[in-house]
Amino acid sequence: MLQFGACPRCKLDISPERKKQSPVICDHCGFSHYENEQLVKAATEKQIIILFSSFVVIALGSFMQLVNWDNHSLDIIPLKIKDTIGMTSPADADRTAEICMDLKKWDCVESNYSKVGNADATKLPRLGHFQMKRAKYNEAAQTYYKFFQNSGTDLEASYNYAKALSQLGKVDEATKYFDSVLAARPNVLQVTVVQNYVKLLMDNQRYDQARKLIQDIRGKGPDSAMFMESEFQKIKSIKTASRE
């Protein structure tokens, strides 16, 4: 502390009497060796606290990363960093979707499917199909609408769009897409498609259309002569009752 008997702070000589005391206190500015030690100690303790806090934060972050992402905790880090700085590519979004699918993080899957679809409209049906599986019919309908507005053509997408529109009560639009699906494969009995189409028509009291649809299918050959018999008889009874 004392270099040649001078005070480190004010650089003036400390009196011999003060030098003999403990702690030594400068008789000019009041600086003491004890005070300096306390400052050094406080600074050291502050550094230790900062280091310990940093360690706790890192350990907690690592634990949360492991809990949230399991065996993908390392793979997801660069993908999340790219997402944060806005440099995610369609391939990155696809990979993130795969990880989220494995961990059953459905919102994450849908979000990344959407990113891929925004970059490549041909991938929108995958997003729409996923939304349909989650019963998010309004979102699915919007996705399929965007796909077809971008000149997309896909038979399954048309069928799913028809089902989404049915769920939303948009009957006229739904029938348009049901008809397009049936017209795309006129020589094939698309049982599930027709059943859903008939259900839509009957649910909305369009019995004449439903009956005609069933009759058209039955007219394709003897193998389909009794196609949807229970629905056909129900329509006949409803029409008979309405005339009485």
Image (cartoon, rainbow, N blue to C red):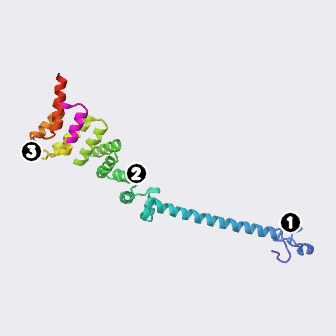
Q: Which mark is residue 107?
A: 2
Please state if 185 lies on the left or on the right of 85 as rendered: left
Which percent across, then down, holds residue 199?
Answer: 23, 38
What residue occupies the far bottom of the structure in this picture?
4
Q: What secondary structure prevails in the magenta region?
A: helix
Q: In which quadrant is the N terminus drawn? A: bottom right
What x and y, as percent, mark residue 40? 74, 69
What amino acid type is highlighted by mark number 3? Asp
Magenta residues (range): 195-209
Which quarter of the picture shows residue 143?
Answer: top left
Picture residue at 27% right of the left edge, 43% below the top: 161
Q: Which mark is residue 223?
A: 3
Which residue is rendered at x = 65% and y = 65% of the image?
Answer: 49
Estimate how packed mark 3 is, as few (under 14), some (14 to 19) or many (20 or more) residues with alpha carbons within 10 Å: few
| Earlier sequence position, callout 1 versus callout 2 | 1
Image side of residue 214 versus residue 162, left or right: left
Mark pair 2, 3: CA separation:
45 Å
Q: Secondary structure at mark 3?
A: helix
Disc 1 versus disc 2: nearer the observer:
2
Position in image of residue 76 (x %, y %): 43, 62
Amino acid type assigned to the residue bearing label 1 in the image: Gly
Q: Position of residue 187 (x, y in %)?
A: 11, 46
Is residue 85 visible in the rendered image? The answer is: no
| Residue bearing the label numbered 1 | 30
> What residue do we see at 27% from left, 42% from top?
163
Instruction: Count residues near mark 2 (Cα–Cα under 10 Å), then give few for <14, some for 14-19, many for 20+.
Output: few
Q: CA distance from mark 1 to mark 2?
A: 66 Å
> Is 81 part of what is drawn in magenta?
no
| Disc 1 to disc 3, C-alpha distance | 111 Å
Upstream in the sequence, badge 1 or badge 3? 1
